[in-house]
Amino acid sequence: MDALDKKILSVLQGNARASLQEIGAAVGLSASPCWARIRKLEESGVIEGYTVRLNPQALGLADTVLVMVTLDSHSDNTLEKFGEVLATIPEVVEAHLVSGEYDYLLRVVVRDTRDYERLLREKLYKIKGIRHSQSSFVLRTLKKSDLPLGV
């Protein structure tokens, strides 16, 4: 990957709907070689897909909760089953296996505290194998950015 590829990726991170002409103009290429580079980045797995960023508050999901979870067991089967259950819970938008005191860090989006309490009762607390969990409500997001590309 060279500097032009990184410039293309930077443009796409800012606006995945940019036209080939817009991307090319931003990086100094015509549309055809720009398209060839994008295809190469897609085929190599650097570009995994194209998405849209949604505003959670506009969708009624005003609260973000970070949930730290410790499991009873660390067997492959327990970790696999835990991941399978999390995949069925739409409010869990991220799940990370982490080092340290807890095993997982989950990012959960909900309407409000009552909605989170419902999620705990109806879904999270029913997952077998959870020994302990701790929740922290996000008060304000200070930084949310694209991946650093060194452009």
Image (cartoon, rainbow, N blue to C red):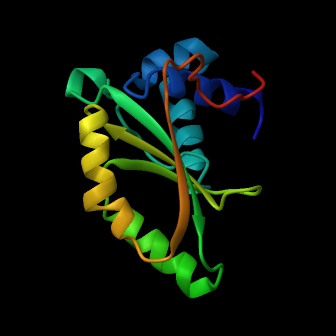
**Residue at image point 46% right, 79% down:** 81
Residue 79 % position (x, y): 56, 76
- Name the quarter where the N terminus is drawn: top right
Q: Residue at x 29, y 57 (%)?
A: 121
Query: Residue sitting at 31 percent across and 42 percent down?
Result: 116
In the picture, measured across the screen, residue 97 lies left or right of residue 107, that is: right
2 in relation to 107, above or below: above
Q: Quadrant of the C terminus?
A: top right
Q: In the image, is 71 to the left or to the right of 100?
A: left
Q: Is there any visible trace of residue 106 in the rendered image?
A: yes
Q: Position of residue 29 (x, y in %)?
A: 60, 21
Compare residues 145 and 12 and report the one nearer the observer: 145
Seen from the viewer's position, the closer of residues 127 and 27 is: 127
Residue 68 place in picture, x, y as percent: 57, 51
Which residue is at the front of the view, 102 or 13?
A: 102
Q: Image quadrant of residue 124?
A: bottom left
Residue 32 position within the rendered picture, expressed as x and y whole percent measured from the top left: 50, 32
The count of marks equals 0
> Which quadrant of the structure image shows residue 150?
top right
